[in-house]
Amino acid sequence: MPREGILPQLWVLTGPKAGDNAQVLRAAAATGLEAVVRNVVILPGQLAAKPGIGPSLEHLDRVASDPLEGPWPEVVLAIGRQLSCVALWIKQQSGGKTRIALLNAPKGLWNDFDLVVLPPYYRNRGRPNVLPIAMPLIGLDPAHLAAARQHFGPEFSDLQRPLNVLLVGGDMGQRRLEPGFVRHVLDEMTRGNAADGMIYAATSRRTPAGVAAALKAGLRPQDRLYTWGAAGVENPYPGLLALGDSFTVTADSLSMLIEVARLGKPLTIAEPPPPGGIGGLVQRTSDLLRPRDLGAAIALLCRGGHAVPLGKAPHAPATPLPDDAAVVGQRLRQLAGVKS
């Protein structure tokens, strides 16, 4: 129950990862509570660090971050290793009264988290403090899609149809995104669903330079390439989501895969082969030892009819991707002591 004289209050911790921020903000919106966002800035030297799990603010730029001071909230919502350390620190400062809700699996101290929201590709889903969900809370804002459709519509109006979108990320663990693999992806697309119309390829900040060069060399005259960070060029990603007819996405980015899957349009997953192995949905033994199994997420999308592996004919899914945002919102309300 809420402490006497203090209304139920939800703090949402945000950080440097836009995809993570979108998930916690979506979960908070589903509660119907008035959430307070506390954005924390990670020190430049700590952005790639993997701190031990425990209550700590040592990795934060305290001056640039939003204030972290009482009165402490009923519930703090976080995602990821670095923000979970901040959540644990808040709980410590509150004398243990603040409850922690965490999206995705913690890297330790499972019992210190009051609610852990777990998509199916994480292990430990049988714990009493775990809420299993069918898919991560990555979503698409219909208003943002509509705005992108209006903004990019004139620019895209002269493009050939169908507009076959290729979204390229980077390495996937030990699986390297190599120029040869993207050439293979282009060959599969031009022989298959992209034989007609055009390919619009877009790279990300993690795309190796050699891969971007291979895309540029392999695209046909009617195709188009956006290279991440190109000077004076607007990132077309929102417009591609809004106006694309079919999508091929490299398997390293779960955020891109889920966003595209929620569109309900044909989706092909291009998964680089493991070292010394073949492509497809093959998993290395080392992959199976990880707490998060991206291969399992890919298999779930394919098994549910929301995507196909590269080499198979893509099709629009018969049913929408499961969305447990409302379920998570209700559990957060209960954690904050709000009666239904």
Image: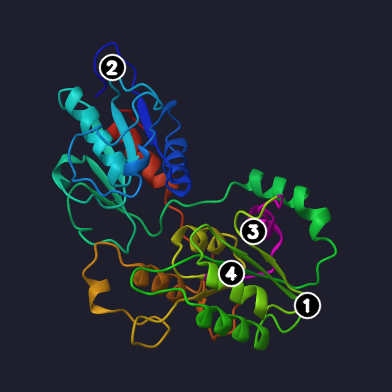
The residue sitting at 30% across, 19% down in the picture is: 69
Q: CA distance from mark 4 to mark 2?
A: 48 Å
Position of the C terminus by quadrant: top left
The residue sitting at 26% across, 49% down in the picture is: 50
Q: Is residue 236 magenta?
A: yes
Q: Give the mark nearest the N terminus, 4 or 1.
A: 4
Residue 231 numbered mark, or none: none
Foreground pick, 19 / 110 = 19
Q: Is residue 234 magenta?
A: yes
Q: How is the image coloured?
A: rainbow
Q: Secondary structure at mark 4?
A: helix
In the drawing, does residue 106 fall left or right of residue 32? left
User: Disc 2 vs disc 1: Cβ atoms closer than 8 Å?
Assistant: no
Q: CA distance from mark 4 to mark 1?
A: 16 Å
Residue highlighted by disc 3:
241
Front of the two marks 3 and 1: 1
Front of the two marks 4 and 1: 4
Foreground pick, 257 / 75 = 257
Residue type, numbered disc 3: Leu
Residue type, numbered disc 1: Pro
Q: Give the mark nearest the N terminus, 2 or 1.
A: 2
The residue sitting at 39% across, 80% down in the picture is: 281
Q: Give the mark nearest the N terminus, 3 or 2.
A: 2
Residue highlighted by disc 4:
212
The magenta-colored residue range is: 232-249
Quarter of the image holding residue 100? Answer: top left
Residue type, numbered disc 2: Gly
Residue 189 at what x, y percent from top left?
63, 82
Foreground pick, 197 / 32 = 197
Residue highlighted by disc 1:
221
Mark 2 neighbour density, 10 Å: few (under 14) some (14–19) many (20 or more): few
In the drawing, does residue 269 fall left or right of residue 215? left
